[in-house]
Image (cartoon, grey):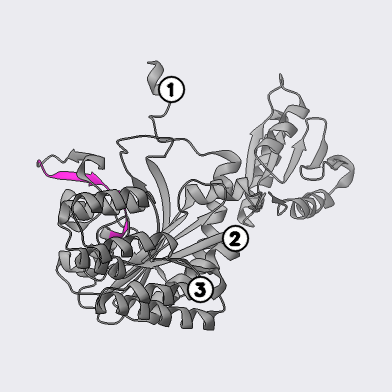
Amino acid sequence: MKRVLHTPEGVRDIYNVECGKKLTLEGHLKKIFQLYGYHDIQPPTFEYFDVFRKEIGTIPSKDLYKFFDKDGNTLALRPDITPSIARVSATLLKDVMLPVRLCYTGNTFINHSNYQGRLRETTHMGAELMGDPSVEADAEMLALVIECLLTIGLKEFQLSVGNVDFFQSLIEDADLDEDAEERVRELINNRNFFGVEEFLDSIQVKRSSKEAFAALNDLVGGITTLAQAKNIAPNSKGVKAIRRLEKIYDILKLYGVEKFITFDFSMSGTYGYYSGIIFRVYTFGTGDAIVKGGRYDHLTEKFGKKSPAIGFAIVIDELMNALVRQKVRIVFTRKNTMILYDPERKREAISLARDFRRKAKNTELIRKDSARSFDEYVTYGNEYYAGNLIYLAKSGEITMVNLVTGEHKILNSGTDGGNSENNRENNTENGSENTTE
């Protein structure tokens, strides 16, 4: 019985202040999505296993949470929301020819085989631009990411941009088979370039290819990095990939956000469905990227419709960790008013609460326990971030406490007459919208 008192490994409860800040953060980000014209979508939490099968290019099957429905179909909790969006684009939106902008908030589930402190359930907020193959679409997504992070107060971050096609041009030039390609990707993702050199030596790859892979370690930086990359591009595919990045950079200058861009040609993409630019955002205070995204022009084809697309996901849990450790304030409004009453004042308390709620004021109604002191309820209000407390005592007194400032005011309902409710409401308005960091 002891086990059910705790959450399983890799998941946790989010409550009280942290939950309030998380929801506030999500609200800020959603507003930015909407400012860019993105529309909400809520795909299901689980889908048929085939939506996330190996050919789709998400994660290995062993890392999926799989189960069966009553008809024996294999289902899976989503490890990534993008394949679900691609399925929607190819089915429900199959007749839409113009670009579609979609955004979402949802949890993803990955059964990490080697659990190293990573959460197995995380919240993602993402945006997907379907049906637009242009460099303008690429630039818009990068600009949207940057604006999201700046809006929530994050200043120290690095947006790393690469191109899968450039990396793939090196793979093709080296004539690597599928197993060798997977090994090279793994080593480079771990930035183990000595290991790459040893491995390529062991399979007798030509010298020019080995030098190109070795150069990836230094192909990280600003706009001058693009010129360096051209020097090792082995074919037209690699050159085209660089030219696209140059065009994207020029558009980002129009957005005024080019200074946040770092090019990294060693990026090959976590997911197999990426087909063009890929990008990640890193910052202090977290061990993993807080944003992951890229172009996936061939993913919707696997569901029956040819449609280019690009998107990204913000990993809210990682972002929260970074904001806390960087002491970036997440401010949310203390809206609740607590009405505490002695049993003899029940009628007045309920009437007042109904009136507040009709006026869209969040109101928590609490009958006072005679065994508990008034100060205990004040402490409770502070812990749960209420804005005000109004106490209707059986003596007829009305005590009002601004829980933010600690200011107390005592009124006598017998002498205050008809003005008592107006005073209560005015005091509530003065405190209920105070903000909390």
Residue type, numbered disc 1: Leu
Of pointers 3 and 1, the one earlier in the residue sequence: 1
Give the Cα distance between marks 3 and 1: 43 Å
Residue type, numbered disc 3: Leu
Q: Quadrant of residue 98?
A: bottom left
**Residue 3 image position (x, y, % from top left):** 38, 20
Q: Quadrant of residue 204?
A: bottom left
Per the image, the residue denoted by label 3 is: 35
Give the Cα distance between marks 3 and 2: 15 Å
**Residue 105 image position (x, y, % from top left):** 41, 56
Q: Which mark is residue 5?
A: 1
Residue density around tag 3, few if under 14, some if 14–19, many if 20 or more, within 10 Å: few
Q: Is residue 330 left or right of residue 175?
A: right
Q: Which mark is residue 152?
A: 2
11 over 372 or under it: above or below: below
In the displayed image of the protein, which residue is found farthest to the top? 1
Number of disc labels? 3
Residue span colored magenta: 72-82
Give the Cα distance between marks 1 and 2: 35 Å
365 over 284 or under it: above or below: above
Q: Residue at x 18, y 59 (%)?
A: 176
Name the foreground residue: 155 vs 224.
224
Q: Residue at x 42, y 73 (%)?
A: 228
Q: Are the two marked residues, 3 and 2, in contact with CB atoms closer than 8 angstroms? A: no
Q: Residue at x 38, y 67 (%)?
A: 162
Of pointers 3 and 2, the one earlier in the residue sequence: 3
Residue type, numbered disc 2: Ile
Q: Which mark is residue 133?
A: none
